[in-house]
Image (tube, rainbow, N blue to C red):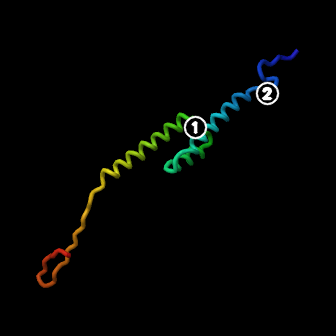
Amino acid sequence: MGKTRSGFCHLYPCGWIEGYHDYYEKDNDSQFVKKLRPEFEHLHASILNKEKLPALEVVVYLSSSKETRLSSQASMENSLTMDTAFVAYRSSSSFNSNKLVQ
């Protein structure tokens, strides 16, 4: 007498549910990555080109890190802007002195 299988193993191959769960999680993770804004294109490409897709928690962490960097760069760029004026001088050949060009 052979061993009897319990559950759905007589209808589906054993282990199919784990495979389906893994596929479903990967699909959700890739959908999250695909919906990232254009500023995150580099991150999007680097995640999807990995041999094994990282867990959703890792993707969210990487996305939030990138978002923090982008926002801090934007705030630094806004705070460092100054109004600048350039003045040019023309030297006079007769007196050899500098005069303001108007």
| Disc 2 target residue | 12
* Alpha-carbon span between mark 2 and mark 1: 28 Å
Q: Given this view, does label 2 or label 1 mark the residue nearer the observer?
A: 2
Looking at the rendered structure, the secondary structure element under dot 1 is loop
Question: Could you say which is closer to the camera, residue 70 or residue 55?
Answer: 70
Q: Quadrant of residue 28?
A: top right
Badge 2: how crowded within 10 Å, few (<14), some, or many (20+)? few
| Disc 1 target residue | 54
Q: Quadrant of residue 69?
A: top left
Q: Is residue 97 shown left or right of residue 16?
A: left
Residue drawn at the location 71% of the way across and 28% of the way down = 17
Above/below status of 77 relative to 14: below
Label total for image: 2
Amino acid type at mark 1: Pro
> Which quadrant of the rendered structure holds the N terminus?
top right
Q: Is residue 32 shown left or right of residue 65?
A: right
Percent from the top left, x then y, of residue 30?
61, 41
Work out which residue is located at the far bottom of the displayed protein and give it: 94
Work out which residue is located at the far left of the displayed protein and give it: 95
> Which quadrant of the rendered structure holds the C terminus?
bottom left
Q: Which mark is residue 92?
A: none
Above/below status of 7 relative to 88: above
Q: Earlier in the sequence, mark 2 or mark 1?
A: 2
Looking at the rendered structure, the secondary structure element under dot 2 is loop
Percent from the top left, x then y, of residue 74?
38, 49
Residue drawn at the location 11% of the way across and 82% of the way down = 95
Amino acid type at mark 2: Tyr
